[in-house]
Amino acid sequence: MEYPTRVGNRLLAALPPADFGLLTPYLQKVSLEQDAVLLRSGDRLEHVYFPHSGTISFMLDMPNGQTVATAVIGHEGAVGMLSVLEPSLSPVTAVVRVAGVASRISALRFHAAFSQSGAIRHAVQTHARALLMQFQHVAACNALHSVEARMARWLLHIHDRIDGDVLPLTQEALSQLLGVRRTTVTQVVRKLRVSGAIRSDRRGLIEINRPRLKEAACECYEVMRRRIDQIFPPETMKPGVQAAPVREIPRDRDPFLAK
């Protein structure tokens, strides 16, 4: 499930030119800094982000302060897109795990285009199906499979969405993704390294051996990968536009990306 990032975000790239034109004047290019919080649980959804590169995790915050990942997205998805279905507060926190860039549009502008375009409404439905699939499988996987298998699955999901075999993930980030203590993460990382699934775990970096990592992962990874391919068939994702002609915001003027 590796798609070229040069076409930008796949949801935007699949839009016909006329429908994409409803969004073009209002799209802004922004940097996604690692560990930046794009959206907090309980926030009103004010912007929609379409990643072109990088990876974002959706985190569920528990009352005791623990967190656990419910989904990850890359250039196949969006953050805040479902705000058009019903104005509400965000149920999850969206955290950048791997740095990248995105196109951003205000939720009000996106809602106006959504009301005018059947293709944009279809893109929202496609994204909703993909997220629901992830939520369902992650819930089942968390209940049935070991921490080691789940960590391998998350690493593969993130690897699918970036270039290269080195993942910039700290043990703190892995602890948040899995909803376990850092001592547990240390033990699991050690097991994966002994098995050869991880070649090294330098401070803040994890270099993976993909074939070995797939052996360590549970069957949920392949099931989820195949279903994502069914939701986003490559033959239907040929770009209607090659890249979003977006306006770039200087980093020092973009308050939404402050860590």
Image (cartoon, rainbow, N blue to C red):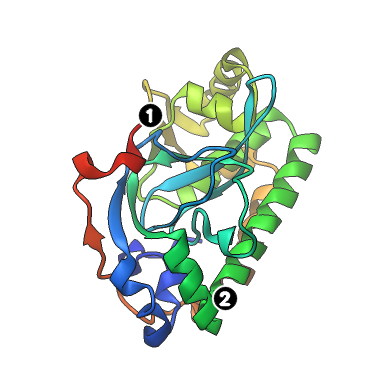
Q: Amino acid at mark 1?
A: Leu
Residue depicted at x 62% and y 51%: 88
Q: Disc 2 marks which amino acid?
A: Arg
Q: Is residue 205 above or below residue 74?
A: above
Q: Is residue 203 left or right of residue 14?
A: left
Residue nearest the viewer, comparing 242 with 85: 85
What separation in Å lies between label 2 and label 1 (alpha carbons)?
A: 39 Å
Choose top left, top right, bottom left or bottom right for residue 68: top right
Which of the two labelled residues, at mark 2 and mark 1, occupies the earlier sequence position?
A: 2
Q: Position of residue 108 (x, y in %)?
A: 46, 63
Find residue 229 and name its label.
Answer: none
User: Answer yes or no: do the residues labelled 2 and 1 have beta carbons within 8 Å?
Assistant: no
Q: In screen coordinates, is 98 left or right of 179?
A: left
Left or right: residue 99 compared with residue 194: left
Name the residue tied to disc 1.
Answer: 205
Residue 120 lies left or right of residue 134; in this view the side is left
Q: Find residue 72 and report its horizontal and vertical position in percent.
A: 55, 47
Residue at 20% across, 39% down: 252
Residue matched to label 2: 121
Please, which residue is most extreme toward the top here? 183
Mark yes or no: residue 226 visible: no
Q: Identify the residue at horizontal 44%, vertical 79% (top origin).
A: 15
Q: Is residue 156 above or below residue 67?
A: below
SS at mark 2 in the image: helix
